[in-house]
Image (spheres, grey):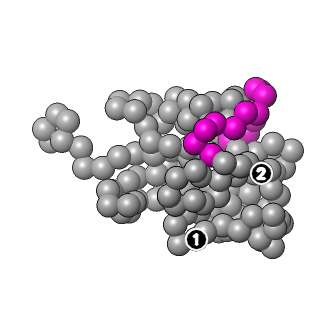
Amino acid sequence: MTKGNYTHRVAVNGYVIKHHKFLLLKRNTFPFIWAPPGGRLEKDENPFDGLKREIKEETNLDIEIIAPVGTWFGNWHGKFLLSIDYLTEVTGGEFRLSKEHSAAVWVAIDDLRTENPVKLNCHEGFHLKDFEEAWKLYLLIKG
């Protein structure tokens, strides 16, 4: 492979948990969905460092990365994207919402199941099953 001839971008997302609730952010740009914090890695950036950076930029929170939850690869708005999703837990920082998002909510898995207070947009973003997998892993590791 020729240097710089990359086939796709890499993104990282964090299922951020605090007090047994997930953090969801409402995007300010299309698609206007509720999703966990995260974003694209910078060139040659370590995924752990990139995830910590993205979460700090979007929420001002510090996190511990517990474990990978899953991956997704596909066409995201005309470009190929590999997404690596991690289970994380808040370790510090005072929450502050970035200008990239219009709202934030901490939501329990049972509330996601009943679509209250937010409804996930499974056509453009994360599915309930994604959060279910993260929650199962959290219970397995953290009890």
Residue beneath disc 2: 105
Q: Relative to residue 7, is residue 131 depicted above or below? A: below
At x 66%, y 67%, the residue is: 120
**Disc 2, SS:** strand
The residue carrying pointer 1 sits among few (fewer than 14), some (14 to 19) or many (20 or more) residues within 10 Å by Cα, namely few
Q: Is residue 142 left or right of residue 30?
A: right
Measuring from the top left, give residue 108's x and y in whole percent. 82, 58
Q: Quadrant of residue 45?
A: top left
Q: Is residue 119 left or right of residue 9?
A: right
Residue type at numbered disc 2: Val
Which quarter of the rendering shows the N terminus?
top left
Q: Which mark is residue 122?
A: 1
Measuring from the top left, give residue 82's x and y in whole percent. 40, 52
Measuring from the top left, give residue 48's x and y in whole percent. 53, 33
Residue 22 in view here: yes
**Disc 1, SS:** loop
